[in-house]
Every structure is written in C-alpha cells, then in structure tokens.
Image (cartoon, rainbow, N blue to C red):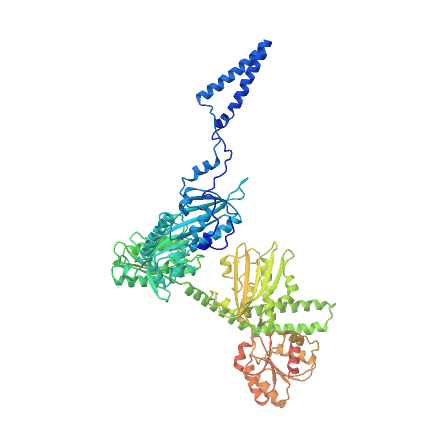
Amino acid sequence: MPAFHAPPSQNQIASLRMREHDAIELPSAPFDAISPMQGLGSYLPTVGAIVAGAIIALGVVASGAGTPVLIAALVALATAGVFFLLAYSAGYIRFGQRLPLAEVVKAATDGLDVGVMIARREGEPVYANTAFEGFIGRGERDAVVGLQQFLASDAAGSAALFRLTRAAEHGEALSEEFSIGRMVVGGRPRRTLQLAVNPLAGDGAQELVLWRLTDVTADRQREANRVAGVEVQLAQFDNAPIGLASVAADGTLLHVNGTLGRWIGRTPRAVLDERLTLADIASGDGAALVSRLTGSESQEAATLDFDLAREDGRVMPARLLARAVPSGKGLTVAIVDLAGDGAAEFEEDASGARFARFFQSAPFGIAMLGSDGRIVSANSSFCRMLLDGAAGTGIAAADALGRAADAETRKAVDEALQRVISGRVHTVPIEIAAGAKRDHVTRVYMSPFAAGGAREAAILYVVDATEQKALEARFAQSQKMEVVGKLAGGIAHDFNNMLTAILGFSDMLLAQHRPKDVAYKDLTNIKASANRAAELVRKLLALARQQTLQNEVINLGEVLTDQFNMLKGFVSEKSELKISTSPDLWTVMVDKHEFEQALYNLVTNAKDAMPDGGTVAIRARNVPERETQKFENREFVPGEYVLIEVGDTGHGMSREVMDKIFEPFFTTKAIGKGTGLGLASVYGMVKQSGGYIYPESEVGKGTTFRIYLPRYQADKDEEVVAPKEKKREQRAADLTGTGRVLLVEDEEVVRNFAARALKRQGYKVLEASTGVEALEVMEKHKGKIDIVVSDVVMPEMDGPTLLKELRKTNPNLKIIFVSGYPNDAFKSALGDEDFAFLPKPFSLPQLAAKVKEELSRE
C-alpha cells in the first residue's frame, strides 16, 4: 500500500488515479482436489488410454505367438478394465475438474459480515469481498481508494487508517477501533468500527496484506448496557444503609461502599490508595480481633462487636458480620452502626447503644454467658486477654478460662461457673495464666446476670493483673536485696578492715622475703586468699549496689578490643570468640575495672554453657532514643544508650531458671563450682551504673545478655581526663614521697599497717584513733599537715564531720577518705567539699600511690 503520512483532503482524494476495475480478480491457479477419490479421477483418461493400448498390443502379439503367458496377461488387463468400468459406474471413481482460486475465495468470503480486502504491501488491491464494498460503497474506484475516501472526513478514522497503513508497510499486525458519524450505504447513525491489518504468511504470500473491517456497534452497545446495569447496582451498593467491604486474605480492603467510606471519613478511592486494612479501621483491641478474623480459615459466618475508628478520632460502636468468599482467600464484610438509625434491628432503645459503647470501650474484659456456659458475646479486651485475639462467641467459658490452668485451677473455674450460672453469687476472684506465652496473669470476677433472661445467665469481668503481680515481685525482690544490702554493708566495714590488715602485712612480709624463701609461698597463698575474700565482699556490695565505683569516661569498643586476648583465655579451645563494635561508638561513664569483671563473668558463664564448644559473640552498638521508645519493658527509661550483647550457642535456659539467675547465691553449677554471685554482681554493677540488663534464652538455642548503659555527654565547661592519660598517671613506678601525713583510723591493726607503709615511702606520719584526737593533733602542730588520711565511720566523730572542722581553719587542706562503704554513702553529706577516696581493702602500693597522687595535685 502506498505510504500514507497524513489523512488526505477531499481534493487530494479526487485527484487520485482511479483503478481499471472495482475488484481485481485473483489469477486462476491449480486448486487441490476436494477428496482423494476426486483427485484420482482426473488421471483416469490417461490410465484408460494406456490400458487400452496395452490390451491391443498384447492381443496382436498373443495371436501371433499363441503363448499362454501372453494370453494370461491379456486376461489380467481385461479384468482391470472391467474393474475400472464397474467402479466408475458405481460412482466410486469420478472425473474432476480444476476450480479457480478466485471463485473459491469469493464463495468463502462473500457470506461473511466482516469486510475483507487483500492487497499488496505497496497498496495494490487484489481482492475485496461484498461486505467490504458494502462498507465503503460501490463505485468506479478500487477498494483502497474507497477506504481512504470513506474515512477521510472522520478524524479518528483517518488517524487510525494512517497508523494501520504504516503497520502494513512494515509487515506488522495492528487493530484499531473508532466511531464514525455516517455510513455511505443506508445512512445509518453513528457506528463503531474495528479495522485490522495482518500480513499473510507462507510461500508466495510474503507481500500480501489482509484488511478486515468489522461493525462492532451492537457489541459495544451490549457492553454499555451491562456497564449501566453495573453502575445502578454499584449505586445501590454505595448507598446501602450498612457498610459493605471486600477484604483480601491479608486483611487489605479491596473495596468499600460509600456508606462505610463516609463512616471512616475516606472515599473508596482513598481507601485503596492508602492500602488500608480491616484492622486499620478498628479502634483499640478491636484491631487485634479483626486481624485474627482475616487470618482465619473457617468458612463459617462470624459476628463480633467492635469500635469503628473514624478519621476525626471518634469511635462508633459497630457490629461486624463476615463470611469467607468461596475461594477461601478473603472475606465479604457487612458492618452495622449500633448507635445510629441502622441499629434498630439490633438494639431496642438508646440504652442498648450506650451499653454497646461501654461494652466495647471498657479497658477490661467482659463476656456474657448463656445458661449452657457458653459465651454469648465478648468484648475485644476479653478476646485479647484470654483468646489471643480470636472471637469468643460460642466457646465454652470453662475452656476459655482454663486453657493454661492446672487441674486445681480448672476445678475452681468449673465450680465458680456452675455457681454463677445457677444464679448464686461468687465474690472471690480467680487468677489464671493467659497470653500467647502464658506470661500474663488475669484476675476473673464472676457474677450472675438476672436481667439477661434465658439467653444471658452470667457475666464475667477479666482484669489484667500482670503489672500488679510484677510490682509485687519487684517489691519482694527489692526487700530481699535490701536485707542482703544491709547485711553486706554491715559486715563490709569490719570485714574490709581485717582484709586491709591481712593484705597490708602480707605485702610488707613479702617485701622482706625472696621468692626462693620457704615462707614466700605461704605468704603468697595468704595474700591470694585475702584477695578472694575481698572479691567476695565486693560482689556482695555489688549485689546490694553499695560497691565503690571508680567511674570514668570510656569507649567500650576500645575496652573490648584491649580485652580480647584476656577474654580469649576464658573460652575453651573448642569454642570461638567473636567481637564486633560500631566504629562510632558513644562513650559511657562506668567503672572500667567492674565492667571488665562483668564481661569475665558473662563469658565464663557462656563457656560453661557450651561443654562441647561453640561460639561466644560480643557486640557493641549505639541505640538511639527513637529505638528505645519502642521497648515494651515498663521500667526502661527511653534515651540514648550503648548496647553490649554477650551471646552464646550453648544449651540455653528454661523459663524457671531465667526467673532466678540474678538472685544471690543461685547457681546451676555443681557444689563447689560456683558461688552464685557472678550474675548477681553483674546485675548490681549495671544497675548502679544507671543501666539495664536483660537476658534472652531458649533451651537448645543459646543465651544472650543485653546490657544498656546510658550514653555519657559532658557539659560544655566540664573537662574530661582522657582514659589513657589517667592510666599513665596511675602507673607511676616511684611511690616515695615527702610530707606530713595525719592518719586517722579507729582500727589499730589497720592504722599500724598504714603508718608503717607510709613511713617506708618517706612520709612523716602522725596518728589519731578518733576525729576528736585528730583535731587535737592538728592544733598541736599548728595546722602544719600536708594531707589527712581518715576513715569514715569512727566513734565520737565521723570522717565527714572531721573534714568540715578541719576546713574551717585550713580550707585548702587535702584529705583522703578510706572506707569499706561506697563513697556515695556519705558524699551527699559533704556537698561540694573536695576530697579523694580509697576503698577498703587496699594494698600498700595503692595507699602510697593515692597519697602521692593527691599531694602532687594542685
């Protein structure tokens, strides 16, 4: 077909060259036989002539030769001839003729309602059927020109013809549909036509194109009528007095009617765009109920009452009726307004609507029971607390309440239900376990319901007592810890005094003996035992959160890296230790030594949990405040924290063990293998540092301890000593010094050791056993004292009071307090007073180093 770059005008059409004929006849060509027998008949004349000639020739030869063979052949040919004659006479063999292809095509296409035209790619028409001519009109022109003129006055048709022409030139198939305002034949009104072009494939037909012109007006009218009917039905659907919705299997709202859209303040289009779910339009606990409903595989109809959430924040009591679609992958939902005009069928008066609102919005569970003990109706709180969010209608109350109850509790539940259903009062609440993990405690109150008639015989009230029980447990634990703390604090002072003397005199004796001496090993064992005793006291104080913490600003990532080799020694050869930290880890304010001890305890526990080997993983990362706001633990204060996780792949712990791991002296190890204070001291250190520790474990899957320590942020004017610099200061090798030291200690054995230790380092030591005596010594020497080393708890006058008295006459006097109590125990009594602190028990080098450090400080 010729290139058609734009719809032609009327003048252009008139100037087109007219073809010599209206429809080009297809050239005659051999056409295949209609049937196999008809094909055979076309060759019979030739065969007959050959057979006849053969018979004549054989007859002549046979008459001359007279041989039997020739006679037999003559007979065979004669028989064949008779056979063909009989078959022809019976109609089994007929003489056929060649049919022209044009006649076959014309006969096949003229009866069609579809206009058909065959043309070459360059535009020369080959054939057009009667229907095609009927569309474009007969005239002295060829079919191509007629089609162009037919569509020339219609913009849509001309544009479609242009695109189809381009497709034909490129040998591509294309179909276009358009409407025109007139028809040449019949003058019919506006019609819808479909024009398609397809290249003809096959040998000898590569250059031919098939054009099809179809009137689809009736089909489109039928479709329009169907659409109009659907629109009427949709209008009725949208304006129904109840809310209707189609819900997918995952709860997504596929379609809602206008009524439901108005209730929730959104158009049906907005519901789809926002991908709202059925749970999104439910308020409070109703969301969990409908979520369970969409996830159910039940084919039975379900009914539940819930609060519908409106866009403006208000709620509307509603009743939801749902049934699964036949495919089982979704729901058809109807929602009735229980407080509006649509509630008349369900509620007798306004009081019923008010009760429905109270019933659904109550923060505690409510269920109505029938005389058979089954739940007639239950609010969303009841279903959430006792049925894991599943609908409760029709379930036996005894089964709902006794799902996780032991035999004794189940018996109590059955007896109480029988009592209230029969109309008798039951005033004693029953506590039962609930929740997906049975880790919630619910308190159930039961009462007969006389106004309910035969349908409703009793009412249940369910209150979540989990928080109350947790508070009771925490209170009991705090009382236990307080008792332990008082015990530890009571013995710590005296015990640490004794340990100070033992450790001090051990150091002095060790300094007087060589390692090869017989007594040297005994002295070493004495000191080691004293250190173990001191560690035990430290753990007791940590448990009671009364240990002395030397807090400093540290980067836990650096600590973990430095301690890798040390921690590796706590892991067995069959186990692997992995440490990973964030590069930008925040700093924290903790006692570095105590934190390292906590790590040792946790890694040791991890090793013991993996007797056959495994992996111990220690990870550290920052936790921003927005992440902590999602934590469900009520005691956790949102903020910025550094998280340290210590996990293992060991045998894990049961829930019973998990509940006791932080209790003092609790251990799962064999007798003599553990004190039961390791995790308790870790817990105390973390709590005393303002952090939180949470264990997570499952039998057979290992254990992970998560420690959250608050991020340290220094004030603008605060100067923080770098940890490394401070460490170098503490490692001063030269402990000797000069100066006058006033030593105040009521324990004579401790005072004697401390005095001898300081004198050996070059100091002049003045001694006093009480605060009053210390003031007398100070007055005697006219205040010429360089530093005071004093105990805190002493008879007559304690350390803080002594400090205040000394500072009256000497405001810049330096003082070091030594005590078995933590410095926090008396720091509040001193206000802003400047002082140093050395915890008991201390060794000779520690005392000498502390005195020299304070004297060198300006």
Judge whether residue 772 can be spotted in this image: yes
Residue 307 is left or right of residue 579, and the answer is: left
| Residue at (62, 77) in percent of width and height | 721
* Number of callouts: 0
- Residue 384: x percent and y percent? 39, 59
| Residue at (69, 73) in percent of width and height | 509
Q: Which of 198 and 706 is in front in this view?
A: 198
Judge whether residue 797 can be spotted in this image: no
Q: Which of 81 and 832 is in front in this view?
A: 81
Q: Which of 121 and 216 is in front in this view?
A: 121
Is 189 above or below relative to 264?
Answer: above
Quadrant for the C terminus, please: bottom right
- Residue 119: x percent and y percent? 49, 44
- Residue 821: x percent and y percent? 56, 75
Quadrant of the image occupied by residue 585: bottom right
Residue 657 is left or right of residue 192, and the answer is: right
Residue 378 is left or right of residue 42, and the answer is: left
Q: Residue furthest bottom?
A: 782
